[in-house]
Amino acid sequence: MDRAQKEHVVAELTQIFTDSGAVVVSHYAGLTVAEMTAFRASVRGAGGQVRVAKNRLAKIALQGLPSEGLSTILTGMTVLAYSEDPVSVAKAVEDFAKENSKLEILGGVLGAQVIDREGVTAVSKMPSREEVIASIAGCLGAPASNIAGALAAPASDMAGAIAAPAGQIAGILATLEAREAA
């Protein structure tokens, strides 16, 4: 890799560290190609991406950033999983690590804050962006559905009140017709 390529990789890594909602750093030593492909697919399915980069270049990319402290865990064979949604990428990496013991989560970055292994686990247990949006939509929609139900209730009560005597009248008429026929 020549100098221009290295500069390009450092620029990409700097953008990853500054623009991502979260970056999870893991050791991937011992993963087969198939397992690494499955890991990439699971992170991609959660809306994230996976990047393997040289630690030296990643440390250069971190220089001067608020998350520069992450460089202390960049040792050995590391892989970066990142996404705009911090919860989804943390959940994807945690879920994969539970299934495959060869992937060892080291820590990561949440916004500009460096977090350890336990921090990644804590983030993965939070509700995702979609879950929070659905919860808010449910809270906003509940009063409207309650009002609609309250407004519709008198009409359905009236329909029931009208239908009950009609059913009784039909029963009486059927009884009278049966008597006349007999």
Image (tube, rainbow, N blue to C red):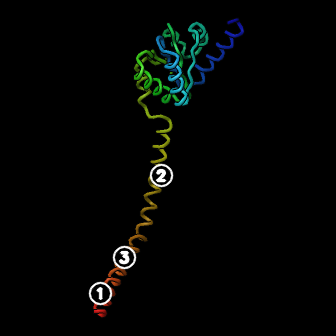
Q: Residue at x 34, y 77 (%)?
A: 164
Distance, label 2 to label 1, CA atoms, is: 49 Å
Q: Mark 2 belongs to which amino acid?
A: Gly
Q: Nearer the viewer, residue 72 or 55?
A: 55
Which of discs 2 and 1 lies nearer the camera? The answer is: 1
Specify few, some or many for label 1: CA neighbours under 10 Å numbering under 14, 14-19, or 20 or more: few
Q: Which quarter of the rendering shows the C terminus? A: bottom left
Q: State left or right for residue 7 relative to residue 170.
A: right
Instruction: For the residues labelled 2 and 3, say whether their Cβ atoms are less than 8 Å apart.
Output: no
Q: How many marks are shown on the rendered structure?
A: 3
Image coordinates of residue 44 in percent, x first then y, are: 55, 28
Image coordinates of residue 51 in percent, x first then y, are: 57, 18
Specify few, some or many for label 2: CA neighbours under 10 Å numbering under 14, 14-19, or 20 or more: few
Among all residues in the image, which is located at the extreme right?
4
Question: Would you name the residue on which mark 2 appears?
Answer: 141
Specify few, some or many for label 3: CA neighbours under 10 Å numbering under 14, 14-19, or 20 or more: few
Distance, label 2 to label 3, CA atoms, is: 30 Å
Q: Of marks 2 and 1, which one's residue comes earlier in the chain?
A: 2
Q: Mark 3 belongs to which amino acid?
A: Ala
Instruction: For the residues labelled 2 and 1, say whether their Cβ atoms are less than 8 Å apart.
Output: no
Against 8, residue 48 (above or below) is below
Q: Of marks 3 and 1, which one's residue comes earlier in the chain?
A: 3
Q: Secondary structure at mark 1?
A: helix
What mark, if any, has residue 175 been given in the picture?
1
What mark, if any, has residue 161 been given in the picture?
3
Image coordinates of residue 41 in percent, x first then y, are: 53, 26
Which of discs 3 and 1 lies nearer the camera? The answer is: 1
Q: Secondary structure at mark 2?
A: helix
Residue 118 lies in quadrant: top left
Q: State left or right for residue 64 relative to residue 127.
A: right
